[in-house]
Each structure stands twice: as C-alpha cells, then as structure tokens.
Image (cartoon, rainbow, N blue to C red):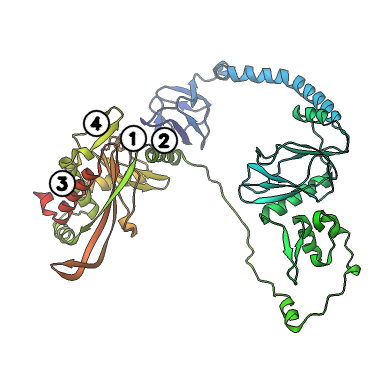
Amino acid sequence: MPRLSDTMEEGTVAKWLKNVGDKVEEGDILAEIETDKATMEFESFHQGTLLHIGIQEGEGAPVDSLLAIIGEEGEDISGLLNGSAEGGSSASEEEKDTEPEAEESSADDDSNEAAEIPDGVEIVTMPRLSDTMEEGTVASWLKNVGDKVEEGDILAEIETDKATMEFESFYAGTLLHIGIQEGEGAPVDSLLAIIGPEGTDVDAVLKAQSSGGSKSKPKKEASKEEEASTTEDTSQKEATTTTTQDGQRIFASPLAKKIADEKGINLADVKGTGDNGRIVKKDIENFKPSAQPAAPATSDKAAEAAAPVAPVNLPVGEESVEEVKNSTMRKVIAKRLGESKFTAPHYYLTIEVDMDNAKASRAQINNLPDTKVSFNDMVLKACAMALKKHPQVNTTWNGDTTIYKHHVHMGVAVAVDEGLVVPVIKFADQMTLSQLGSAVKDLAGRARSKKIKPEEMEGSTFTVSNLGMFGIQEFTSIINQPNSAILSVGAIVEKPVVKNGEIVVGSTMKVTLACDHRTVDGATGAQFLQTLRAYLENPVTMLA
C-alpha cells in the first residue's frame, strides 16, 4: 500500500483495474486507492503478471501492507505468502496444538469445579438494572447473613447510573454470604451474594466460584431473571409502590406489578406475604378472583373519580438503524479535527461588515467583459492582504518556536460527498480578484470530482470557510492545523441599519475568526478583523 500523501496512514482500495492473471506493463493503472484526501489512480512500477491481490475492493489497510504481487506467469508465490504470515501461522499452529489440551483441561476443571458447588446453592451477581449500567453500588442490604430469603424478597437497594432500585431475590434459601458491602461499588456480574441451604460450606463455594466453577441456571429461573431485569430496566423507578383509592400505599415488587397488570388483578385486593406486607410474585400467582372482597360503598363523587379512564392512543412504530462504514477520508477528518480542537486553545472573535459598497463594486466588476467575481473571492483577497499586515496571524505553533510564514497560501474549505477537503491557493496575496475566482472554481471542481492532486491540498497558512450560500448567518469553525486561524463567513442579509443618524436598509455580513491562543492574542485577532473589515467595506482599496 503506497503512501500517496504526506498525512496518509491508511488507504482503501476503491477499485481494481487489473485481475489476477492479467498482464501488467510498467505504467499501467493497477487500482484506484482512496486516501485521506482524494481517490487516486495507482500505477505499476513493474511489469509481469498479477499473481496475487492482497487487499480486496472496499477494504482498507495501513501504508506498506501487502497490496499485490507481480511476477512471472506460473511462478510459485506460496513462499512469499507464507513468509509474510510466518509469525501468525506458527502462533496459530501452537494454538492448534495446545487447543485440545486446553479444552480437555478446561472441561475437566469445569466439571470438577461445578461439582464442588452443592445443589441448591445459587450465586447472585450484580445485576444490570439499566441498559447503560456498567457498575452498581449497594446502597443498603435489607437482608443479613443467616436470614431466610423467599423468592421475591427484596435483597438490597442498588444504586445504578440512573436511579436507586430495589433488587429482589429469584431464589429461596438462606443468605449465606454478602460479596459487596453497603456503600461499595462493583462491575456488573460481580459476586453480590450467595443463597443456599443453611449450613453450606461457604468457603468451598467461594473457592469454586473464584476459580471459574459455576452452575447453569434452569431455563425457568433464567427466564424469571430476564423478565425481572427487563421490568426494572424499563421502569427505572426509585420506589415500587402504588396507592389505593383511600390514599393508603401498597408495597409491591416490580415483577408482581407487571404480572398483576397482565392478569388484570387489582393490587388493593391482594394480601402481601413479603416483608411489611409487601406483595410478591407468588401472591399474584396464588390470588383467586373468587376471594376478592366486596367493594365498599362509595359516594357518587368517589365512584365518578374511580371510573376507568379512556386509554390514550400512542403512536406505534418500528425502530430502525443503519450502520455505515466510515470512509478513510471521514476517519482522517475526525482524527485531524479532534486533534486540533483538543490541542489548540480556540477562541472566537466576530464582527459585522457593511457590504453595501462591496455589492456595488462587485456589480461594476461583473459588468466588465469576461469577468466574474463572487463575494467569496473578495473575502479571500481581503484576508490575503490583511495577513501581510498582521503576520502574527500567518503563523504555526512549533512547541519551543513559532514559525512565521512570509508567503500567503489560502486554504478554501470545500464540501464533498465524503466530508470536507481544503484546496490551497498558493501566493493568494499576489493574485487579482478574477485570478482568485478562477483558481477557486478550478480547485473546487476537481476536488468534488476527486481529480485534485494531494500537493494541491497541502501547505495552507490560513483557511476560509464560507456557509453564506446556505443561509447561515454566523458560525464558528475548527482551526485547520498547522494554521493559527480560520475565518467563518456568513450570509449577506438586508436589515435596518443606522447611517448618518438615520435608520435605512443596509446589507451586512458577519464573519468569525477562530484563533489559536498560543500564537494569536486577542488584540492581534481584533486588529486583523478591523483591517479585513476596512478592505471589504472599501473594495477599491484592494485594487490599488
């Protein structure tokens, strides 16, 4: 894989123009390779027969990875291919050799360790009580070691990343061991507690559990745990209580409430057998509607208040997502902009420019034969001239030194399908407005069609990003390092302005300068913008 630009670290094969077995001449195009800046044709420096393709179309690989092998027709290349993967193959063979032994050993260990855990002993782990939970903290234990535990009893209150929730037991027995004390936190699936028959040797269970011994849960119990976990995930409530019509509180577990809702059972009619009269799952399952007590007489107002509320029709839809592989260009853009934003201390300065004279001057210039300039061309020209007057803005931070650029190479941000590229206009300060316009049009067009050369996107000393054509009035940009500043150009808008003490309709444009505070101080950036505004509000000065 060749290095086709100075910043290229990885390439993606967009298309192969030769197939295995094809004759290749020196200078033939082998493939189109997508770099971090453009898709470029890669030509062969050798002649012969294409014997092997190492990177398929659409796949990416680091620079210097095996791209292809060219040689004599019928030549044996197995030695080359095996040699390139010698380390991996030997390691693979070693893994294969040791794998059966490891599996045997693992199987033996598992069987031994599982046998060490007595029947009826259950390992309770830190549950995942929300979809984003990675760690939980035990707020309080509601059972102590030695206490009897019934299925549905609340073991502990666990603090997640979203709420403090009650965690109920899915097993019956004696609480033999507490693995996480109150106030302590632990990752999901850590040992929380051990429940089993009274008198069980806890040390043996802990030893088996720590060495990997485990017992598979019966399907029924696993489904119970999944059902309860799902219920608690969706509820995410700090308390599991409801209220009767007379205002008294009814304590019920989330699973009990869910089953009651499904069966249409009123919790006020159920007698709880859990702690403090709390309603648990078995109370709902054992509830018989025939034993339901008669409802007490109520007044007309109470009956009216207790009348069922009509259900609310909520929208029902199907969630869908699509995962798209990031192109090499998109990954490099993310990397470069992230490095710039988090290493260079950005600050922003905004001014409003009177564009009435600029509009009039542009109209006069465009009336000339074979001449066409845009407002963006005028901004580029004004920036180039302002940089010559304020060289501190035309710099690069270099750690112990600051590099002053005595030339002006203007970067122009251009949006393409895959992201953003920055063609560079060399020596922009020496160009006329019409020359700038032609250069921008040419570079932007070739950038969008992926025909631009890497060297045409290197060496900028200052960058301009213009979103005015999209109606954006004001925005900020991330500095295109190693530049020290970038100018964000908004749209020209008509609005009431004050001129000569009177309110009139005027055309204004906002521009925002993002500066690297390591090289450009606030006063320096402000002075640069003052000079820029002077040029734009009096375009004739740029023609002098």
The residue that disc 3 covers is 432
Task: Identify the residue shown where x is 71% and y is 44%.
Answer: 127
Q: Could you say which quadrant of the image residue 341 lies in? A: top left
Mark 3 or 4, nearer chain start: 4
C-alpha gap between disc 2 and disc 1: 9 Å
Task: Identify the residue shown where x is 50% and y is 23%.
Answer: 69
The amino acid beneath tag 2 is Thr
The residue that disc 4 covers is 403
Furthest toward the left, the residue is 544
Q: Is residue 8 left or right of residue 175?
A: left
Residue 123 horizontal/vertical position (percent):
79, 37
Q: Nearer the viewer, residue 152 or 119?
A: 152
Density class for disc 4 (Cα within 10 Å; few <14, some 14-19, many ≥20) is few
Residue 6 horizontal/vertical position (percent):
35, 30
The residue that disc 2 covers is 35
Q: Are marks 2 and 1 in contact (CB under 8 Å)?
A: yes
Q: Nearer the viewer, residue 223 or 433?
A: 223
Image quadrant in which the N terminus is located: top left
**Up/down of 211 relative to 173, above or below:** above
Residue 129 horizontal/vertical position (percent):
68, 48
Could you tell me if residue 279 is visible in this image?
no
The residue that disc 1 covers is 454
Furthest toward the bottom, the residue is 300
The amino acid beneath tag 4 is Ile
The amino acid beneath tag 3 is Thr
Task: Identify the residue shown where x is 27% and y is 63%.
Answer: 493
